[in-house]
Image (cartoon, grey):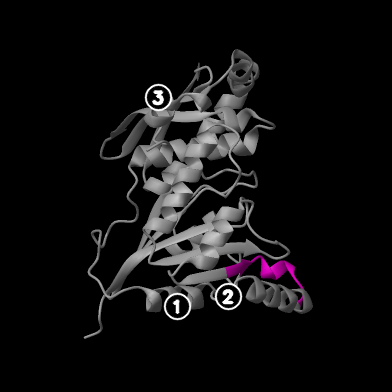
Amino acid sequence: MTEHRAGFVNIVGNPNVGKSTLMNAFVGEKLSIITSKAQTTRHRILGIVNGDDFQVILSDTPGIIKPAYELQSSMMDFVKSAFEDADVLIYMVEIGEKGLKDDKFFSKISETNIPVLLLLNKVDTASQELLEEQVQYWQEQLPKVEIHPISALTNFNIKNVFARIIELLPVAPAYYPKDQLTDRPERFFVNETVREKILMHYKKEIPYAVEIETEEFVEDDNIIRIRSVIMVERETQKGIIIGHKGSALKRVGVAARKDLEKFFDKQVHIELYVKVNKNWRNDNRQLKRFGYSG
């Protein structure tokens, strides 16, 4: 009988290198929201991949930045904790990148005793020559890490990397029930889905001033009824989110409902409201309420 392996695999890297896309490629479900805007991921999200003889618990962390306000500081705390409980660390970079935006994190990666897989992402956009040059660069920067070229978007080399992760995990029983996909409650995915649609439909600072709170999630046999509040920091932002005669808000609701029906495999009815919640990004008490600071 083969031994059962289980452990925590934490994904770190700069914003927008494809960490959430990789996580979703591994898990096979759209757990982490993916948009082209930086700082899409604000929390550590656990995705769980189960097999007969393994359980891989993946954690996608916010992109590494130098914090400018309280919310960002608390986001970076999630990244620090990724180093503390990992059995395998995935450091994700994209072609042409030259290191992390924070030197302290970079030296942590070079000094850690945890196995590190450096995944060189977006190789589908690079020539063979550039790829070889990049591999050599990273070998010099981080001699201890294993380098794997991948494309998270096209699934190139993902299976091989996943097999390698399982090899590196300790022999251990499963940490979570085998039918569990994530440690997050349903409301969390409602919030993230609505936030993703706001990131896609609005420009400039609007998406970053937004937090979503799902006040109601009632599941019947054939429908889920959801009521969510979109919090903004200023009256002007409220007007922009709602749009002319409510058209912009309606568009967000329709797009979120489609995704949530796919995710929950059930009919969804979602109502969205907008409230002004001044300066929540710098208010520790509120950040705690939204699950940011420890």
Between residues 218 and 146, which one lies in front from this camera angle?
A: 146
Q: CA distance from mark 2 to mark 3?
A: 42 Å
Q: Which residue is mark 2?
A: 148
* Numbered disc 2: secondary structure: strand
Q: Residues within 10 Å of mark 1 (few under 14, many from 20)?
A: few
Q: Are marks 1 and 2 in contact (CB under 8 Å)?
A: yes
Asked if one can make out residue 258 in the rendered structure from this viewpoint, the answer is: no
What residue is disc 1 on? 164
Crowdedness of circle 2 by 10 Å Cα count: few (<14), some, many (20+)? Answer: some
Whole-number angstrom distance, CA of label 1 to CA of label 3: 42 Å
Residue 52: quarter of image: bottom left
- Of 104 and 228, nearer the camera is 104
Q: Residue at x 69, y 69 (%)?
A: 124
| Front in this rendered view, residue 256 or 294 | 294
State the residue position of label 3.
285
Let me know if residue 54 is in the magenta part.
no
